[in-house]
Image: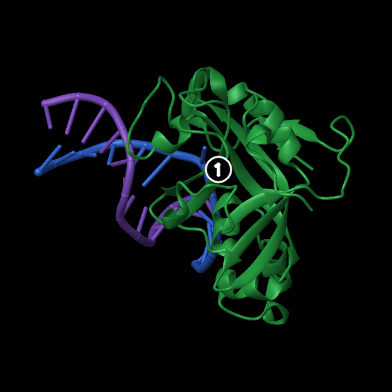
Chain colours: A green, B blue, C purple
Amino acid sequence: MKKLERDFYNRHTLEVSKDLLGKYIVRRIDDEEVLCKITEVEAYIGRIDKACHAYGNRLTERTKVMFGLPGYAYVYLIYGMYYCLNVVTEGEGEPSAVLIRGVEPVSNIGKMSLLRYGKAYDELSKYQIKNFSNGPGKLCKALGITKSENGLDLLGDDLYICDSREIIDLELDVKVGKRINIDYAEEAVDFLWRFYL
DNA sequence: CTGCCGATTTAC
DNA sequence: TAAATCGGCAGA
């Protein structure tokens, strides 16, 4: 498995979004390493997207990471209690990112279970297993990602994404739909920028 | 400084 | 179906 390089992220956000499906997120935490497969993403493109935090070149303390180099983590707090992980895309000064909406645990699920629920994986209910990391806030919990991971370089060692051996057929395997919970975004609510396996 | 609201999740 | 919960943002 090979760590994705800067050039992978330095492309059109829709291309990066689709290409992220099936890739592995690697997270180093508490001297352990956990691994997840990306199964669901959404694209956010500031220049044309009213759903994006950086729409209209809105440069604030929160959004500034999206204006920077591609391949960095944009983590924000939502609803006062959950974190969401994004991957910054496109060139400097072009605010855009891919929201990671869902992953499947691959290895060291025991560590993730402790982070997510505070108990061992074999103690989990069927309901808890089903909802383990199928949402942006849930997967951040399972990966131990908080605001202190905001601005992390994904070419570093603490949090990165790497190739898997799995071959994803962009026509057959990737489903497309409207993004979730962006009712306020006017015409952008209809953009088909959600991709999932 | 004030007030509103959210790229969600969970419990009832 | 609705509450939880608080930082970010805009406007005064």
The percent coordinates of residue A177 (x first, y second) are 71, 31
Which residue sits at x=40%, y=22%?
Answer: A57
Image quarter where the C terminus of chain A lies is: top right
Q: Nearer the viewer, residue A116 or A27?
A: A27
According to the image, label 1 marks what residue? A86
Does A78 sit above or below residue A143? above
Secondary structure under badge 1?
strand
The percent coordinates of residue A163 (x first, y second) are 77, 47
Which residue sits at x=69%, y=77%?
Answer: A121
Q: Nearer the viewer, residue A122 or A189?
A: A122
Give the residue type that dot 1 points to.
Asn
Tell me if A12 is positioned left or right of C3 in this view. right
The percent coordinates of residue A6 (x first, y second) are 62, 37
Q: How many marks?
A: 1
Q: Nearer the viewer, residue A138 or A29?
A: A29
Tell me if A152 is positioned left or right of A112 in this view. left
Which residue sits at x=51%, y=59%?
Answer: A145
Residue A123 is drawn in which quadrant?
Answer: bottom right
Residue A168 is drawn in which quadrant?
Answer: top right
Near mark 1 (Cα within 10 A), the count class, few <14, some 14-19 or many ≥20, is: many
The percent coordinates of residue A12 (x first, y second) are 65, 24
Chain to which mark 1 belongs: A
